[in-house]
Image: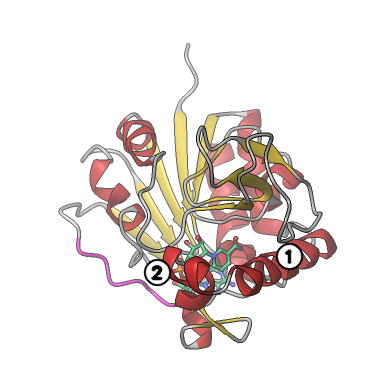
Amino acid sequence: MPRKKIVVLTGAGISAESGISTFRDAGGLWEGYDVYEVASPLGWAKDKEQVLKFYNMRRRQLKDVMPNAAHYALAELEKKYEVIIITQNVDDLHERAGSTNVVHIHGELTKSRSTAPPYNIYEIGYSDINIGDKCEKGGQLRPHIVWFGEPVPLMADAAQITAEADIFIVVGTSLVVYPAAGLLEYASHNVPKYIIDPAKPEVFSVHKNIEFQVEKATVGTPKLVTKLMKD
Ligand code: NAD
């Protein structure tokens, strides 16, 4: 019998207890920076050095933190289910916890991308990107991150994956950053849906069968995984 498909949408909240702060909880400042200064094409045009410095710091921080019980619990689900994680996070904590199928709709800290066609993407691990780091075509490298106001190229894939879910789980996202927030609406009406977040997000949805777990990710996720492993 084919295995049931679980699709999990995760946001910054799942990594909060690993020590990576969400910015929505910090009043619009992300580690002391105005997000629009460091995470927008306008910010990049204005001050490339500041943007690179900001992401270099995020990458260094990422090297020093560890996945938490929520990341590990989701990896555990693969023992019984086909699991696809759609994450808004740019960290690599799902992969480091053992999840094998992760779609990063907002990009990845551990990659750089050229600003010149064909906009090649490079693995950089936890190393810095500096002014003057260029691709073979001479284009300055930038973080491989989807900034505010930029298109989300993997959105159509994410919608298709969500539509095929037998169970849909959301962990640690305010569901206010579009287009990702709209993914819930692509899930089938009859499939069970769970939302784990200590601040119950206001959900504008046609779906009535949503179960809220108003708990931190490291509490609610292992609990839900234990239940799903028994079902
Ligand atoms: P967001 O809008 O998804 O909000 C964060 C959510 O996490 C809130 O609903 C909050 O209640 C919840 N939360 C806080 N602590 C939690 C916990 N312990 N357990 C479970 N949930 C918890 O995210 P944002 O911070 O506004 O960031 C928006 C975008 O910025 C992200 O989608 C991402 O692209 C980027 N970002 C990435 C990271 C990362 O990669 N770790 C961190 C911050 C921001």
Q: Nearer the viewer, residue 47 or 161?
A: 47
Q: Nearer the viewer, residue 20 or 218?
A: 20
Q: Is residue 127 left or right of residue 31?
A: right
Answer with mark 2 or mark 1, whichever residue precedes in sequence.
Answer: 1
Residue 39 seen in the figure: no
Assign a secondary structure to mark 2: loop
Is residue 110 located in the magenta-colored stretch of the structure?
no
Q: Is residue 180 above or below residue 12?
A: above
The residue at label 2 has a CB less than 8 Å from ligand 1:
yes
Q: Please state the total of marks drawn on the protein image.
A: 2
What are the residue bounds of the magenta stretch?
Answer: 199-204
Residue 72 rendering spot, x and y as whole percentages: 70, 49
Q: Is residue 193 left or right of residue 20?
A: left
**Furthest residue to the top?**
1
Assign a secondary structure to mark 1: helix
Q: Main secondary structure of the magenta part?
A: loop
Q: Quadrant of residue 199?
A: bottom left
Residue 36 seen in the figure: yes
Residue 144 rendering spot, x and y as whole percentages: 58, 49
Q: Which residue is mark 2?
A: 174
**Furthest residue to the front?**
138
**Furthest residue to the left?**
206
Q: Is residue 94 above or below residue 149?
A: above
x 20%, y 52%: residue: 207
Query: Type of residue at label 1?
Result: Asn
Mark 2 to mark 1 CA distance (whole Å):
26 Å
The colour scheme of the drawn protein is: secondary structure
Q: Are marks 2 and 1 in contact (CB under 8 Å)?
A: no
Q: Quadrant of residue 131?
A: bottom right
Query: Type of residue at label 2?
Result: Ser
Q: Which residue is mark 1?
A: 56
x 20%, y 41%: residue: 189
